[in-house]
Image (cartoon, rainbow, N blue to C red):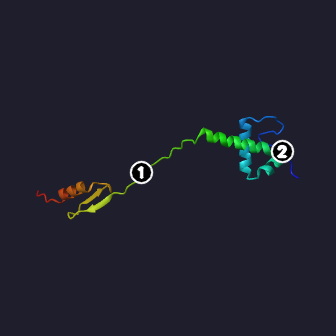
Amino acid sequence: MPKPRTIAVRSTRRRWTGSDARAAIDALDASGLAVATFAQREGLNAQRLYRWRRRLRSAACVAGPTTAFVEIRPQAVAPVEIVLRSARVLRVAESIDGHALLRLVDLLEQEHGC
């Protein structure tokens, strides 16, 4: 039988600090093992792990959810190209007001004599 590995917590301590418990619970979660199997492998008391896991989870619930910020970037909008009868190319944003676009096209399509 392989010798139990020592994690950050020594089972000989009577009391664990919060950081001791967090280290043990993190190691338990990372192992993917059942609590009893992990405790036996590490030489720990399974009931202690259950208690600390419950305490740490309830403390996280009491503290409330942490605020997460999500960056929102506007999508790059490709311009709309309009080829006028005069062969001019007009590039406008897709969000342009329809009335403003009509006035602009009318203005550009007017015949200007030089």
Residue 86's image quarter?
Answer: bottom left
The disc at residue 43 is 2
Q: Position of residue 68 (x, y in %)?
A: 54, 44
For marks 2 and 1, give the CA distance. 54 Å
Q: Secondary structure at mark 1?
A: loop
Number of numbered discs present?
2
Tell me if 35 is positioned left or right of 60 in this view.
right
Q: Which residue is mark 1?
A: 74
Q: Position of residue 91 (x, y in %)?
A: 29, 57
> Mark 1: few, some, or many residues within 10 Å (few <14, many ≥20)?
few
Amino acid under disc 1 = Pro
Using the image as rendered, state which of residue 77 and residue 47 is in the foreground. 47
Outermost residue, right side: 1
Q: Nearer the viewer, mark 2 or mark 1?
A: 2
Using the image as rendered, state which of residue 13 and residue 57 is in the foreground. 57
Circles 2 and 1: CB distance less than 8 Å? Answer: no
Residue at left offset 80%, top offset 47%: 39
Amino acid under disc 2 = Gly
Q: Position of residue 108 (x, y in %)?
A: 19, 57
Going from N to C along the chain, the mark reached first, 2 or 1, is 2
Which quadrant is the C terminus positioned in?
A: bottom left
Q: Is residue 89 above or below residue 67?
A: below
Residue at left offset 86%, top offset 48%: 3
